[in-house]
Image (cartoon, rainbow, N blue to C red):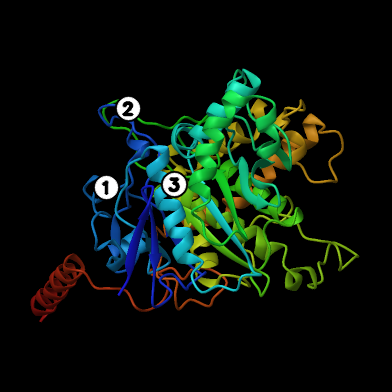
Amino acid sequence: MNTIKKLNSIYIYTMSQHPFPNSDKLYILPCIQEKQATGGMDKENIPGRPSSCFQDAVDVSKKMNNSLAKMCVGTKMNNNTLCTYDGALEYIGNKRTSCSSEIVWNYITDFINRRNYDQKPETTKNFFIVSHHNTLKQSILANILKAQKKLTKEKFHIANCSCFMLEYTDQGWTFSIVFDGFPDKPKYNYFTGKNKILFGPTKLDINIDSGDDWKMMVTWLNFIQDKKTKIFLIRHGNAFHNKPLKLTGPALNRTIDTNLTPLGIYQARVLGETLLTEGHLQPEGVRNINTFCASYMNRAQHTALELIYALNINSTETMNVQQPETKSVTRRPSVKDMYQLAPVIHYKKLSMLERFFTDFACSRLIRKSGGLVKFLKNVEKLAKWDMNFKVNENGTCEKLMPQRIRRCSYIEANSHMMAALQNIAKYSMEEWDAKRFCKSYAISNQTSSRLKNPQDGAGKKKTKKRRRRRKKQKTKKKKRKKRKK
């Protein structure tokens, strides 16, 4: 039996067995959902699912099914294969809305304590949590941002794929920015810096008033029992409803649960590679355990999965493969040069789910664009977006470009971005052109390099309509034969 102790509204569980032993799962946390506008008109912040075409597969040529928007709710979500994508997702609790700072950290610390249960004390426990701009500002990091505003007298925003870290040191808890991300609005004042401590015990001496908000945050964090825990808080990558595309749909029928654009996929992969090179993201082993978490939204889940893509691309096994176009075999591969399928080395189930998400996101953008021709125009719009070529303090050009492109030459940078985004969507464009729209998410038993398309080969599920058509065709043939006789 599980027992619950309540300490200052933080629930701590003492258990007889490990509740979440599986690392090859994406955990969907409550209360980190994006804040919805009054009236619920912003449907891009309502979780949804695409229409099914047969068992364990969805039709990417159709709109998101409005009737499925409220399907993944309640206590039986984890028993629904469409909600969990064949068991790759696991829902913690059933609260889909955003919460106050105290309640959201109630849930986060509770989940961390349960996930860390029975783990070795010397092992570093990394939690990668992907959420949204307003939720990070107004809920998850609200107390820290209040303290920061009192300290600097400035208001800061959070760029796409920004990453913050909460870590316990000898002096206590510290809050630092690991990666400052990709700004999407030129007028905003964003957090800048890399591996830079923004708040911690030493900051309290500067401004006593700002210390109250930070102390409250530390109070919540202190309920984490294992102090070898690192929490990485991430904003998702560029999505349909963000600039420059802003594919929100008409006012009364807005786009449900928007996906990442090819640019957002690329941004998330760059973030993953940055975390890897800085030593924050490493293959799971004796010294570290990784746990990937996200909100209910497609774009947040996809961003978390792209961290695993970067991990697989940069793995030792990939580095040892001889690349035909390069002379050196020890050169580290980069997500800035490799865009398509990564080898499934770490986290098999989540790696295969990343392939499904990327195909689904690109296919959905093709449909919303109105076909392949207009889709390529949108890709060009994403590639030529002026925010990709900023070279100031929080410049994005240096982060997006590979080392071979020097000084962010506009012509070279623009050509690189166009090629990168087209290659990310290449498989989806080929599938769309071949009119293969039914995509399987049943990934647990798949071993092929690509997701098996249910329309390829045998195994089609005969629907009632197909059976009726075939009966009619048979009866017509019989009538024709009788007439000839």
The residue that label 2 is drawn on is 250
Quick one: 425 or 435, which is closer to the camera?
425
The amino acid beneath tag 2 is Pro
SS under mark 1? loop
Q: CA distance from mark 2 to mark 3?
A: 36 Å
* Residue 429 spot, x, y in % from top left: 52, 52
Q: Residue at x 74, y 73 (%)?
A: 317
* Quarter-of-image position of residue 144: top right
The relative height of residue 477 versus residue 369 in the rendered view (above or below) is below
> Of helix, strand and loop, which one carries label 2?
loop
Distance from label 3 to label 1 (Cα)?
26 Å
- Tell me: 232 left or right of 338: left
Circle 1 Cα neighbour tier, 10 Å, few/some/many (<14 / 14–19 / ≥20)? some
Q: Which residue is mark 3?
A: 105
Q: Quadrant of the N terminus?
A: bottom left
Q: Nearer the viewer, mark 2 or mark 1?
A: 1
Name the image quarter holding the C terminus. bottom left
Secondary structure state at the residue bearing disc 3 = helix
For marks 3 and 1, the one nearer the N-term is 1
Q: Position of residue 299 (x, y in %)?
A: 47, 46
| Amino acid type at mark 3 | Trp
Cα distance between the residues tagged 2 and 1:
18 Å
Outermost residue to the bottom: 485
Residue 245: percent from the left, percent from the top?
50, 31
Residue ID for mark 1 = 69
Tags 3 and 1 touching, CB below 8 Å: no
The image shows a total of numbered marks equal to: 3
Q: Looking at the rendered structure, which numbered label has been put on residue 7?
A: none
